[in-house]
Amino acid sequence: VAIYQARGLQHGDHFRKLPKDARIDPYCTCEITHKPESRIQTKVVTNSGSPVWLHEADIPNYAPGESLLFSVWHKSALYRDILIGRARLRGLKFDREGGFEGDLVLFELGRGSKAAIKVRVTVDGHSAMAGGQRRDYALEP
């Protein structure tokens, strides 16, 4: 799984606890639906509505046909981390030759918010990372 970037992240109804001028410090998680132990996570990119993560990792114990759940969060120092939005990628979209690469529109956003994440997912020996290693990059804004 490769989680490249997000665009269009902004304050919405889910940021009620934060002042309107508060910054967004996003990170993204990905897991097999109903298997939280499979979760991978990007680094936090501070003060960005369009973070670039360039994160690649293998997700173990994937079974053919399972869906992936991507969640974008705001890292909060004062409260629990706040969910910005989610996107689900069904197995039939990536569990095939060539996998999937493209934008996933986030749902569970506040009113008027539109955001998406760009990802790549491959399986069956065509994994985003060979050898089970993990790479993680964060570009400074």
Image (cartoon, helix red, strand yellow):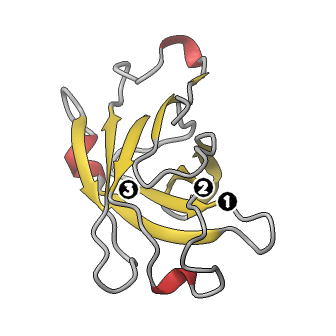
Question: Which residue is identified by label 1?
Answer: 75
The amino acid type, in three-letter code, at marker 2 is Asp
Closer to the eye: label 3 or 2 = 2
Q: CA distance from mark 3 to mark 2?
A: 26 Å
* Circles 3 and 2: CB atoms closer than 8 Å: no
Question: Which residue is identified by label 3?
Answer: 67
Q: Earlier in the sequence, mark 3 or mark 2?
A: 2
Residue 45 pos. (x, y %): 58, 44
Image quadrant in which you'd find residue 99: top left
In the picture as drawn, the residue positioned furthest to the right comes out as 78
In this rendered view, identify the residue nearer to me: 47 or 126. Answer: 47
Q: CA distance from mark 2 to mark 1?
A: 5 Å
Residue 137 pos. (x, y %): 56, 25
The amino acid type, in three-letter code, at marker 3 is Ser
User: Local crowd at mark 1 within 10 Å, few (<14), some, or many (≥20)?
Assistant: some
20 left or right of 94 in image = right
In the picture as drawn, the residue positioned furthest to the front comes out as 21
In which quadrant of the rendered image does the N terminus lie? top left
User: Local crowd at mark 2 within 10 Å, few (<14), some, or many (≥20)?
Assistant: some
Image quadrant in which you'd find residue 106: bottom left
Q: Which element carries disc 2, helix, strand or loop?
A: loop
Q: Earlier in the sequence, mark 2 or mark 1?
A: 2
Q: Residue at x 21, y 48 (%)?
A: 93
Q: Earlier in the sequence, mark 3 or mark 1?
A: 3
Question: Which residue is identified by label 2?
Answer: 25
